Image: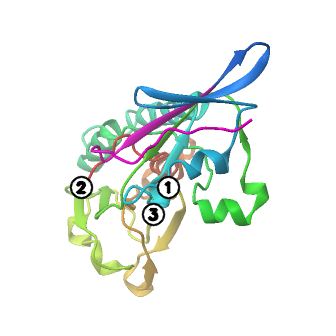
Amino acid sequence: MNLKFLSLSVYKSKYIFVIFSSLLILGAHAGILQVNEKSISYADGAKLEVVVDQLLIPPLSYWPATYIRNANSQNDALLLKNKILEQLSQLDQKNKGVLKLRRDIERFKPFGRININLDPDWIRLRPTANPRLIGDYQIQLRSRPKTIEIIGLTAQSQTLRFNAKVLHSGLVDRDRYQDWAELNFIYVISPDGQISRIDNAYWNYREVDILPGSFIYIPISSNQLPDSMENINDDIAQLLAAGEEGKDD
């Protein structure tokens, strides 16, 4: 069967949400790829490469910040957010750093990405990275971001224009740290979902690569956390790695 795909040549919005779903037609499974009000159908679902090939549209093809999700992954991200908010509510509510972090998490709208690399070159070179999509999916395309964000236990969250490929400890102003801020390391969350814990003590000065669209998270000091919350900083980094819905610079 020859598959005829819709032309996707003109977009005015910075974000495009693509919904891919499966349905039953005459007893055989078929897929629907919906772009706004347009849709196509094809038999037997879709290989990831087929879907991605339809999305290779400059300048919206910044693959590190292109996300795919289904209902389960979105729900998992929302549950994680609620868990974090519940834990933060059990900490000292008079502490400015805790209150600031809680506001950051409340404002964050997780996309709920599935950890799949949508870079077409990556997929073509690795057959195991080209699964068949079964069920309902949504893809968010994003153009190349121009900023990075610093959130967590700082006096104020910051959005910085991205103008370099390296991060050094001087980028994070320690004088702006709130009480309870961790002084020895920070988290860097790349738009492709990679999480790095970077030593940030004065004696551990180093430079690391960073992508536009990254988050820098200033965590809570483990000395201030009860044993039951020892993983809360890792959970917050994981939430940020789920991607942000409709994020715009």
Q: Position of residue 154 (x, y in %)?
A: 26, 58
Task: Please tell me whether residue 175 is drawn above or below residue 62 in the rendered image.
Answer: below
Q: Earlier in the sequence, mark 2 or mark 3?
A: 2
Q: Position of residue 179 (x, y in %)?
A: 28, 57
| Residue on which disc 3 sits | 187
Rendering colour mode: rainbow
Disc 1 vs disc 2: which is toward the camera? 1
Task: Please tell me whether residue 115 is drawn above or below residue 112 in the rendered image.
Answer: below
Q: Residue at x 39, y 48 (%)?
A: 9
Question: Label 3 sits on what residue type?
Answer: Tyr
Q: Earlier in the sequence, mark 1 or mark 3?
A: 1
| Residue on which disc 2 sits | 157
| Secondary structure of residue under mark 2 | loop
- 210 horizontally vs 138: left or right: left
For the residues labelled 1 and 2, the Cα–Cα distance comes to 33 Å
Q: Quadrant of the C terminus?
A: bottom left
| Residue on which disc 1 sits | 56
Q: Residue at x 46, y 62 (%)?
A: 190
Q: Position of residue 46 (x, y in %)?
A: 69, 38
Task: Tell me the chief SS of the magenta region.
Answer: loop
For the residues labelled 2 and 3, the Cα–Cα distance comes to 15 Å
Question: Which image quarter: residue 166?
Answer: bottom left
Numbered range of the magenta stretch: 1-21
User: In this view of the protein, which residue sits in the foreground, 134 or 10?
Assistant: 10
